[in-house]
Amino acid sequence: MAEAKPVEALTEGEAADELAFLAKEIARHDVAYHTRDAPEISDADYDALRRRNDALEAFFPHLIRADSPSKRVGAGVAEGFAKVTHRVPMLSLTNAFSDADVADFVARGQRFFEKDAGLELAFTAEPKIDGLSASLRYAHGKFAQGATRGDGEVGEDITANLRTIKDIPQNLAGSGWPDEIEIRGEVYMTHAEFEALNAKSAAEGGQVYVNPRNTAAGSLRQLDPSVTASRNLRFFAYAWGFASAPFAKTQMEAVAKLSEWGFVTNPLMIRTSSVEEMLQQYRAIEAQRATLGYDIDGVVYKLDDLALQQRWGFVARAPRWAIAHKFPAEQATTILERIDIQVGRTGALTPVARLLPVTVGGVVVTNATLHNADEIARKDIREGDTVVVQRAGDVIPQIVRVIPEKRPAGSEPYVFPEFCPVCGSPAVQEINEKTGKPDAVKRCTGDLICPAQSVEQLKHFVARDALDIDGLGSELIELFHDEDLIKSPADLFRLKDRADEVKLALFKRREAQAAAREAQSGAKRKKVLSAEERTYEGLDKLFSAIEARRRPELDRLIFALGIRHIGEGNAALLAKTFGTFAHFESVSALAASGDDGAVAQLMSIDGIGETVVGSIVRFFSNARNKQAVDDLLGEIEPLEYVVASADESPVAGKTVVFTGSLEKLTRAEAKAMAERLGAKVAGSVSAKTDLVVAGPGAGSKLKTAESLGIAVIDEDGWLELVGAS
Ligand code: IVH
């Protein structure tokens, strides 16, 4: 399958298949490498898999999967880095977008210090480097540890990678440095390096790197420092965090020290006492932007005097004494040829603008997100319009506005579809839980039958917390779905009748995997499988696992249907309320047909609100969902919901209080569970309380319980007590 057919020569179907294969294969190798420390392929082969994935995604951006390896670069790989708590948090900067914002900033400073007679405030102005900030801890002049910014409090230990950057000294030069100091600055990639890397990658048929910043980020988060080293990253020092002793009185002086100690500092930094000169420097730096050789996205002004900085202080996560004056986002004009609707795996309909390709800030843009129907209406965006496109720092381009003078005659406002373009089901807006107003996003109501949603729905259906079908994981669901063997939950129970086709599908997959391995490693396969070997030993087991679930517990079944907003807790509440599936279904169907009594009955369930009821109504209003459910009921016989009898349950008749946060159960679920077992759940602790289940963060309720001598257990203890551990 992974015959190196050029990406351009693939059909969409082939590309989608290959992306699915690569997602799994790369994830498997990631586990082998990072978790088990037992790589099965060479780094070069692994990189080749990733490059192929990147190349496919670059060419077929609409096929990028939710579980794409490219989305995991950050989080996934990051699991390999240890956490570092910054001794002084790494702050961000407040933004200024206009000259007036800058004048306001200076005026704020003047007001703050107005009692200091005769004080003239001086500010520094320097480029804002568009890279990644890093904090470098030096102990007795030696580079000891380096970390990413992370969330500002805790970053990741990337010492080994930072050591490969030649602008970062291993030992501080000169003298006078504090024993302990965190030096801060920006890691970045020059344009020359970025272009060379892309040229090299293109020559090898590899991925296209989008911009220097993202590439620098990816390069820094490599688990193999030799990869980082090959990227020739650079570093500008411009700040510091913890310092065991003061070493300067002003920003200017401090940065001069950083330079003496061997760091590269930016040559465009000036000091001035006037707003005019600050703005002049802004324009001077902006004028040089294209020829600097590295990306900058604005100018940072900082109060020069460090003692005054300290006095002026901080707001939330940013200093009051500094501000980032941003350059306007890069924009270009092009034609919006068409608006396509994509249907996501949760059924969200997302409009995408297909553009006549245009270069914005050095990147060719062909698509832009339109977010939702409201946004299209608000900006009155129509097919055929000439539009202004903008890339604001980030990679995803946006449509800023339409140029109405260029609108072709006879153009019509865009009408957002009322139906899902994939399955034809009605598309509706949900009521937002928080605002009580309709959501901006329209969703397909074909939960169980829409091909765009069904694979995820099926995976959910068989998952551990739902029907819990042993041995039927995501991979097999995808395979059977791709091979048209299962389209809706009922098909699972008919899979056995198509055993031959199932075997064939499994065989095809095995062949494809072997062929891919062969293509990757260059090694020949030892032997070709014979017809007899086309059996699948686990198959009987799988079929019996499916058979074993023909009588599912009611709460699990309701949860398994994947109705939005019905998690395990709500499913348990519904199961408890209705007792049988038939009862639940008939009330839901009545509610869907507009029966006020049925709606009221659902609304009256303690713990179930408008959002959930809206969701049930939406689900059962779609005749095809209902049909899929009935089809399923032809195959299975859900159990009645039984409330444990008093003598069986260890908590029957007891009053239980949950406090603190629970990690394995939601509150609703814990409550439903307790009630199902005959307990009464109370909100506060009193002498009548029999048992307190306390999680992390439990406060006054726990104290009261302890003072009253009431039994206290944790969540695990609770699960054990009720036999659910
Ligand atoms: S000073 C307490 N100076 O911009 C102030 N930051 O938007 C710390 N940045 O997280 C930052 N160039 O990554 C400062 N010359 C510069 C900068 C700069 C780029 C980054 C830095 C910071 C972000 C805030």
Image (tube, rainbow, N blue to C red):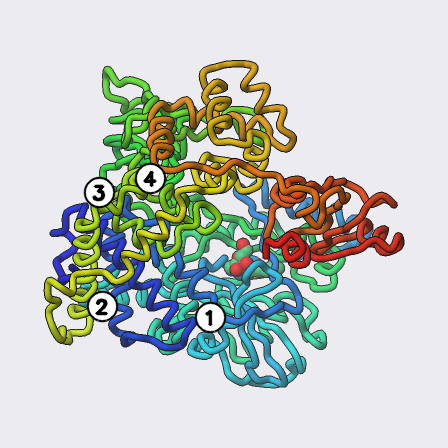
Q: Residue at x 22, y 63 (%)?
A: 206
Residue 442: image x %, image y %?
41, 28
Towards the viewer: 568 or 194: 568
Residue at disc 4, secondary structure: helix
Q: Residue at x 77, y 43 (%)?
A: 655
Residue 454 disc label: 4
First in sequence, mark 4 or 3: give its number.
4
**Residue that carries the numbered disc 2 in the rendered image:** 200
**Residue that carries the numbered disc 1 in the rendered image:** 80
Of the two numbered discs 1 and 4 in the rendering, the one whose residue sits closer to the viewer: 4
First in sequence, mark 4 or 2: give its number.
2
Q: Amino acid type of disc 2?
A: Lys
Number of residues whose C-alpha sits closer than 10 Å to that of mark 2, classed few (under 14), some (14–19) or many (20 or more): few
First in sequence, mark 2 or 3: give its number.
2
Of the two numbered discs 4 and 3 in the rendering, the one whose residue sits closer to the viewer: 3
Asked if residue 416 can be seen in this view, the reply is: no
Q: CA distance from mark 1 to mark 2?
A: 27 Å
Q: Quadrant of the N terminus?
A: bottom left
Ligand 1 is within 8 Å of the C-beta of the residue at disc 4: no
Number of residues whose C-alpha sits closer than 10 Å to that of mark 1, classed few (under 14), some (14–19) or many (20 or more): some
Towards the viewer: 58 or 255: 58
